[in-house]
Image (spheres, rainbow, N blue to C red):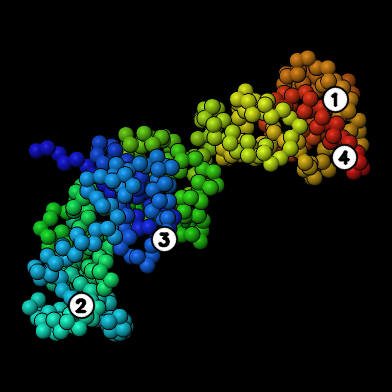
């Protein structure tokens, strides 16, 4: 037997931004398909027209592509199983719904929303799980509604929905690829609406029809869809279709183990992109939310390609996965540490140009935007930044003059003689040849020793005047990169400013 080509799908509703949970679902579907040399497809589930958001489809696809998840078939790229947007497939659902009606697996329901609500309240009062009371289940299907009534309502043009008839007292069973065998008792299942009064199918109906017609072999989705499984499986049975395999992914949790929510942090992938996380980090992080390579592996940093090679559904856990921002930050740091300088330069150059366009600097723009200069800044700052954009923002003193000095640091590091020492040491720097980290260090030590002083009396003030702040990379290397001219100018200006302040 020829093995069927693996086909997986991500089926978002275009109701807004891409949630990190959605990214994980998409990623696992993508990784699994690619690992199995199969296809990954995007289908847009827009059957709830009231929740549809303009541009959401484009944004979802764009964000996935940003993460490197490119679909083999989608509304934008097409494919042999289209259309890939459910609102363009209404005629298909109608046709399959007719078949269910004919086979007496579905029926028309004219109950009004007031009636349904009344019924719900009544059942709740009786301590029952609310379910449709089958008022409109026709006589010939075991209910009490004469078919003449149905015809009458139809002729009057009263709005209706179409419900599936869930068989009584059967058990519905399937084997989840993550959870193992799962069983449901049909008495707990509602006669689900399949077609709404607006002529649109419900999610449950449309997704089963499409999953079958689009020939998906594996449905990988969030745990929240597990309770829908019996409805879906019954539909497969009604049609005589073999269901695909299913895998329900564990919930994403806040660190306090509550369900991941906006209240405790950002949940939109776009928010993380805006903060400056790289796609490698986000993909790596999201992949680890519920999956790991297995015992005995220390590896935590994976590229998308490595994830494709190593991913397996067997290694996805059942327990909820905690969304830990510290881990995310740690991963971003690892990413920055190992990223080739040339790649970082490519990212930061546009940022730097934008900054230079709006801010004056006495430094030579040609020098500070050169690869050579940027490489030195990157090597000095690599261990100190949390995001790539911080090479420009956090280390702005490599590009712009400090506008102010850290107040507290000045208080702490300045004594009566500090400015005089700085002036004197400046004349040493003026003639230093070459002007390098080593020569600056040697000169500073040589300068303080005969005066009976410690290097710290100059190290700290020099750093503060050169950078504005009291922390940073090795002072001597920083001064070397800045260059003699900039250092002398900054020291002179600083001394002058501080002297003026008294
Ligand atoms: N449209 C559903 C969602 O928004 C898809 C669920 C599924 O994958 O079946 O999550």
What is the spatial separation of the Cα atoms under label 2 and label 4, in whole angstroms? 83 Å
At numbered mark 1, what does the secondary structure look like: helix, strand or loop?
helix
Q: Residue visible at 55% across and 47% down?
A: 275
Q: Are marks 3 and 2 in contact (CB under 8 Å)?
A: no
Circle nearer the N terminus (1, 2): 2
At numbered mark 2, what does the secondary structure look like: helix, strand or loop?
strand
Picture quarter containing residue 356?
Answer: top right
What is the spatial separation of the Cα atoms under label 4 and label 3, in whole angstroms? 56 Å
The answer to whether 264 appears left or right of 496 in the picture is left
Q: Residues within 10 Å of mark 3 (few under 14, many from 20)?
A: some
Instruction: Tell me the mark number nearer the camera, choosing from 3 and 2.
Output: 3
Q: Residue visible at 24% across and 78% down?
A: 159
The answer to whether 51 appears left or right of 459 in the picture is left
Circle nearer the N terminus (2, 4): 2
**Residue 276 at x, y = what percent?**
54, 43
Q: Which mark is residue 335?
A: none
Image quadrant holding the N terminus, namely top left
Q: Which mark is residue 53?
A: 3
Q: Residue visible at 85% across and 34% down?
A: 493
Q: Which mark is residue 426?
A: 1
Circle nearer the N terminus (3, 1): 3
Q: Write down the residue under mark 2.
A: 109
**Residue 477 at x, y = what percent?**
70, 25
**Is the residue at mark 1 in contact range of ligand 1, meaning its CB lies under 8 Å from it?**
no
Q: Is residue 339 visible?
A: yes
What is the spatial separation of the Cα atoms under label 3 and label 1, in whole angstroms? 62 Å
């Amino acid at each position: 037997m020829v093995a069927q080509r693996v086909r997986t799908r991500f089926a978002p509703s275009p109701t807004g931004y891409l949630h990190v949970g959605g990214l994980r679902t998409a990623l696992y579907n993508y990784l699994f398909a690619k690992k199995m040399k199969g296809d990954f497809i995007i289908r847009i589930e827009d059957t709830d027209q009231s929740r549809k958001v303009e541009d959401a489809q484009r944004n979802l696809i764009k964000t996935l592509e940003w993460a490197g998840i490119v679909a083999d078939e989608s509304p934008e790229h097409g494919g042999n199983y289209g259309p890939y947007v459910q609102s363009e497939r209404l005629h298909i659902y109608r046709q399959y719904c007719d078949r269910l009606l004919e086979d007496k697996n579905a029926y028309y329901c004219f109950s009004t929303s007031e009636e349904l609500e009344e019924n719900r309240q009544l059942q709740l009062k009786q301590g029952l799980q609310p379910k449709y009371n089958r008022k409109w289940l026709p006589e010939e299907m075991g209910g009490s509604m004469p078919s003449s009534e149905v015809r009458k309502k139809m002729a009057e043009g009263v709005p209706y929905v179409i419900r599936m008839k869930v068989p009584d007292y059967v058990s519905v069973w399937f084997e989840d690829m993550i959870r193992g065998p799962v069983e449901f008792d049909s008495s707990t299942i509602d006669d689900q609406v399949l077609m709404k009064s607006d002529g649109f199918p419900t999610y449950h109906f449309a997704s089963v029809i499409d999953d079958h017609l689009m020939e998906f072999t594996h449905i990988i989705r969030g745990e929240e869809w597990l309770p829908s499984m019996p409805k879906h499986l019954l539909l497969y049975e009604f049609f005589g279709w073999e269901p695909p395999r299913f895998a329900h992914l564990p919930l994403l949790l806040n660190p306090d183990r509550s369900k991941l929510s906006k209240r405790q942090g950002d949940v939109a992938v776009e928010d993380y992109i805006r903060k400056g996380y790289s796609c490698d980090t986000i993909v790596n992080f999201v992949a680890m939310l519920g999956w790991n390579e297995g015992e005995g592996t220390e590896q935590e940093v994976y590229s998308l390609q490595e994830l494709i090679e190593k991913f397996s559904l067997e290694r996805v856990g059942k327990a909820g996965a905690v969304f830990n921002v510290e881990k995310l930050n740690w991963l971003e740091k690892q990413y920055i540490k190992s990223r080739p300088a040339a790649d970082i330069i490519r990212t930061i150059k546009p940022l730097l140009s934008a900054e230079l366009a709006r801010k004056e600097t006495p430094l030579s723009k040609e020098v500070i935007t050169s690869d050579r200069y940027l490489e030195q800044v990157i090597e000095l700052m690599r261990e100190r930044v949390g995001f790539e954009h911080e090479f420009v923002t956090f280390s702005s003193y490599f590009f712009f003059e400090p506008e102010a000095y850290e107040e507290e640091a000045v208080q702490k590091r300045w004594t009566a003689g500090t400015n005089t020492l700085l002036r004197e040491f400046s004349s040493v720097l003026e003639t230093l040849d070459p002007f390098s980290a080593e020569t600056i260090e040697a000169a500073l030590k040589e300068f303080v020793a005969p005066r009976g002083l410690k290097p710290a009396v100059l190290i700290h003030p020099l750093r503060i005047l050169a950078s504005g702040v009291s922390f940073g990379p090795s002072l001597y290397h920083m001064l070397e990169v800045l260059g003699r001219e900039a250092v002398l100018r900054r020291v002179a200006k600083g001394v002058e400013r501080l002297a003026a302040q008294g």
